[in-house]
Image (tube, rainbow, N blue to C red):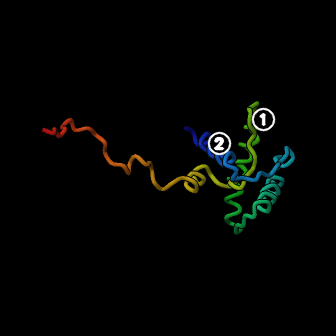
Amino acid sequence: MGIRRVFLVSLLLAMAFGLVKSLEFTERDLSSDESLWDLYERWRSHHTVSRDLTEKRKRFNVFKANVLYIHKVNQIDRPYKLKLNKFADMTSHEFRNYFSSKIRHYRMLRGSRAVTGIHARKG
């Protein structure tokens, strides 16, 4: 699965479980870097996200890419619409690490279930 598809699926799952409050944006918010920065500040305020200046600059670039992706997907005729939520400044990798389990897969914990072919007979 591509990274964008994983991100999209992750966002959809988060929305399905009611973990998110969204923030609306318009075409005007996307018209320039300044308006995107204003949207980012509005988003940070809405979700009470605090960052130092260096982290804000880094996160803004991720946020900007996510906003543009959300806008692009929403232009397509689909039965759902994506929105800005509290995860909007996270990369898909960060999102997966934040919400996924440290246990890779439960089958790894159960051990081998191979059949040996030798059965004990009662006799």
Helix, strand, or loop for circle 2?
helix
Identify which residue is drawn at 75% across, 39% down. Answer: 81
Q: Which mark is residue 114?
A: none
Q: Which mark is residue 75?
A: 1
Q: Amino acid at mark 1?
A: Gln
Q: Considering only vertical position in the picture, is 89 above or below 82? A: below
Callout 2: 10 Å neighbours few (<14), some, many (20+)? some
Does residue 10 appear to the left or right of 46 in the view shown?
Answer: left
Per the image, the residue denoted by label 2 is 8
Does residue 106 appear to the left or right of 120 in the view shown?
Answer: right
Q: Quadrant of the C terminus?
A: top left
Q: Earlier in the sequence, mark 1 or mark 2?
A: 2
Query: In the image, residue 45 lies at what x, y percent?
Result: 79, 62
Q: Amino acid at mark 2?
A: Leu
Q: Quadrant of residue 114?
A: top left
Query: In the image, residue 76 lies at what x, y percent?
Result: 75, 32
Q: Quadrant of the N terminus?
A: top right
- Taking the view exactly as shown, the residue that stands out farthest to the bottom is 52
